[in-house]
Image (spheres, rainbow, N blue to C red):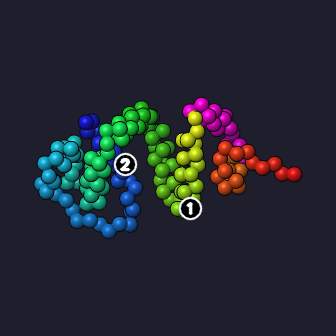
Amino acid sequence: MNKAVILLFILLTSLSLPAFALMPPDIEWDTLNKNDKKALNQVKNQWAFLSSEQKHNILNGLKRWRSLNKEERGEFQQRFKQWKSLKKEERDGIRKQFKQFKQMPPQQQQQVKKRYNWYKQQPMERRQVLRQKWQRMTPQQRKQALKRIRQNNGAMGRKPKSKK
């Protein structure tokens, strides 16, 4: 089991916890069980410097990691490998987009998720064509395309109704 993968999984899953949650009590390294200490050995030296919330998030992520089956762990490891291959600027851009997404109203988040799920259901060839088309668009064309999507209330895959 790749410990770096586990730690990234734990840290990424901890991002989804609400920031307004009550501050949990602190957890000392010595109070962790043997299995947790073994899995988190890479952060042992930093443990005392982490906030109580960070420690709880890490432990919750570890618990979630342990609940994944072999296939789910393999999928996560593949995504982690892709993440590591990205340039720093690309990772920073993704983090910025994620932060923007989390700041959206819930209804808007649902629309984004709906569009993303539609996109993921498309055959690989169709997704590639859509990506290429998007990349060829100017920023103004992209704005217009997004406006049309919003007007159609997320009716993906269908052409806008022609106005007569």
Q: Name the amino acid, label 1.
A: Gln
Q: Quadrant of residue 135?
A: top right
Q: Which residue is mark 1?
A: 107
Residue 148 point in image, percent of width and height: 71, 50
Q: Which residue is mark 2?
A: 12
**Residue with the most extreme right position:** 164
Observer-side mark, 1 or 2, equals 1
Range of magenta residues: 124-144
Residue 54 vs residue 127, the one in the foreground = 127
State the residue at coordinates (29%, 48%). 67
| Mark 2 element type | helix
Residue 153 point in image, percent of width and height: 66, 55
Q: Name the amino acid, label 2.
A: Leu
Apparent side of residue 149 relative to residue 30 in the rendered image (left or right): right
Q: Quadrant of residue 138?
A: top right
The verdict on residue 138 being magenta is: yes
Apparent side of residue 31 relative to residue 96 in the rendered image (left or right): left
Asked if residue 158 shows in the view, the reply is yes
Residue 66 point in image, percent of width and height: 27, 47
Residue 78 point in image, percent of width and height: 39, 34
State the residue at coordinates (68%, 38%). 137
